[in-house]
């Protein structure tokens, strides 16, 4: 189940345009069989799905969640039996046909208590072809009073026949400055911490909330991971070449042994290599301002061309990890390459 959508979380819902469109749908009383939430990672698609589910089932009858009735409270707490969330299984990158069939078995019977039952498929663009065909059959004859929300970052992997059955709503990415403002004004984070988190998460609002600890129980302890990783990578970059090769394999082993840390670790590394590249010209614009002196000492040992090469190697590694390459071999290749430059 996703984190609860509390009143404070309302401030991090997507922009007013998607919410206005969702509210209008509820006002018309014509709930589509399927909605497609399309937009970059971390733009509030999951929160919007909860908002819409609450609005469809709110007993206050005001076309928006009241957060007071039993239905709104259950959905907010992630305890409503008729709100079904589906996504890739743990440590898996694809949604399989068995998951879609299991979901179909659940919704074959009547809803427990909801006026409108929701099936929200997170990362729906990761359904394999067999899963998509199975979902298409369900969308062609959906159960009564059941709507589907497909949350995707890209539409290309989806079958045209699935896309044609969905009402599309687009979500726009927030800037890191907007995320910093949200963290400061709505969650009370100090400006320095908000600067580091927003710079690390980029436009990914979900990751920013997770790194800040606002989505409890949803991520490893970033406050411990970040300083450890920055110190390790700076130490690695200052070692003699014959020693850095051994250290590179050690770092690769540690990170690949904990895949649950890898996404956030890569986000930290992205800021580190970016900071090295802009340190010479805009030191006040780096993300990791608390490591400014360490970065200055490290950068004195390397040419600017070498630091640009680090960034290129990092981007290549990100693409390899996103294309399902093995974590250990990909990280071995990355850190060993760094030790040669």
Image (cartoon, rainbow, N blue to C red):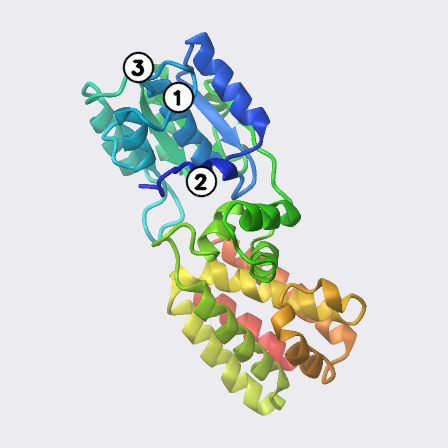
Task: Check disc 3 and report its element: helix, strand or loop.
Answer: loop
Task: Check disc 1 and report its element: helix, strand or loop.
Answer: helix
Q: Where 341 falls versus 45 (above or below)?
A: below
Horizontal relation, residue 286 to residue 234: left or right: right
Please tell me how crowded label 2 is: few (under 14), some (14-19), or many (20+) other residues with Cα within 10 Å. Answer: few
The reply to whether callout 3 and callout 1 are in contact (CB within 8 Å) is no
Q: Quadrant of residue 269?
A: bottom right
Q: CA distance from mark 3 to mark 1?
A: 14 Å
Quick one: label 3 or label 1, which is nearer the N terminus? Answer: 1
Q: Where 33 falls versus 17 (above or below)?
A: above
- Of badges 3 and 2, nearer the viewer stands 2
Residue 162 image point, x, y percent: 45, 23
Instruction: Quadrant for the C terminus, please.
Output: bottom right
Task: Check disc 2 and report its element: helix, strand or loop.
Answer: helix
Q: Where 226 falls versus 133 (above or below)?
A: below
Q: Quadrant of residue 319?
A: bottom right
Query: Which sits in the foreground, 208 or 39?
Result: 208
Quick one: label 1 or label 2, which is nearer the N terminus? Answer: 2
| Residue behind mark 3 | 145
- Label drawn at residue 55: 1
Q: Report whether residue 326 is seen.
A: no
Residue 19 image point, x, y percent: 52, 25
| Residue behind mark 2 | 8
Residue 136 image point, x, y percent: 38, 23
């Amino acid at each position: 189940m996703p984190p609860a959508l509390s009143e404070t979380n309302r401030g991090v819902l997507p922009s007013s345009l998607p919410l206005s469109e969702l509210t209008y749908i509820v006002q018309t009383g014509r709930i589509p069989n399927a909605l497609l939430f399309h937009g970059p990672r971390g733009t509030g698609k999951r929160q919007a799905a909860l908002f819409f589910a609450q609005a469809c089932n709110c007993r206050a009858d005001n076309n928006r969640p009241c957060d007071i009735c039993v239905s709104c409270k259950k959905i907010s707490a992630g305890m409503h039996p008729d709100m079904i969330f589906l996504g890739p299984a743990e440590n898996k990158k694809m949604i399989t046909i068995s998951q879609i069939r299991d979901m179909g078995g659940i919704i074959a019977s009547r809803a427990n208590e909801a006026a409108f039952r929701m099936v929200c498929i997170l990362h729906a663009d990761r359904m394999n072809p067999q899963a998509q065909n199975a979902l298409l059959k369900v969308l062609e004859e959906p159960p009564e009073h059941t709507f589907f929300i497909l949350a995707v970052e890209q539409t290309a992997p989806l079958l045209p026949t699935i896309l044609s059955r969905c009402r599309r709503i687009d979500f726009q990415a927030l800037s890191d400055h907007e995320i910093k403002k949200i963290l400061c004004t709505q969650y009370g984070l100090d400006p320095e911490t908000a600067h580091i988190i927003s710079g690390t998460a980029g436009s990914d609002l979900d990751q920013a909330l997770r790194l800040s600890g606002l989505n409890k129980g949803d991520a490893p302890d970033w406050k411990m991971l970040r300083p450890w990783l920055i110190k390790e990578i700076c130490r690695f970059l200052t070692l003699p070449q014959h020693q850095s090769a051994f250290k590179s394999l050690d770092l690769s082993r540690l990170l690949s042994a904990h895949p649950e840390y890898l996404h956030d670790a890569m986000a930290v590394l992205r800021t580190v290599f970016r900071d090295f590249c802009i340190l010479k010209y805009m030191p006040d614009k780096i993300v990791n301002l608390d490591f400014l002196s360490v970065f200055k000492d490290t950068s004195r040992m390397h040419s600017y061309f070498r630091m640009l090469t680090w960034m290129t190697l990092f981007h290549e590694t990100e693409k390899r990890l996103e294309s399902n390459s093995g974590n250990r071999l990909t990280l071995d290749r990355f850190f060993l390459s760094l030790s040669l430059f």
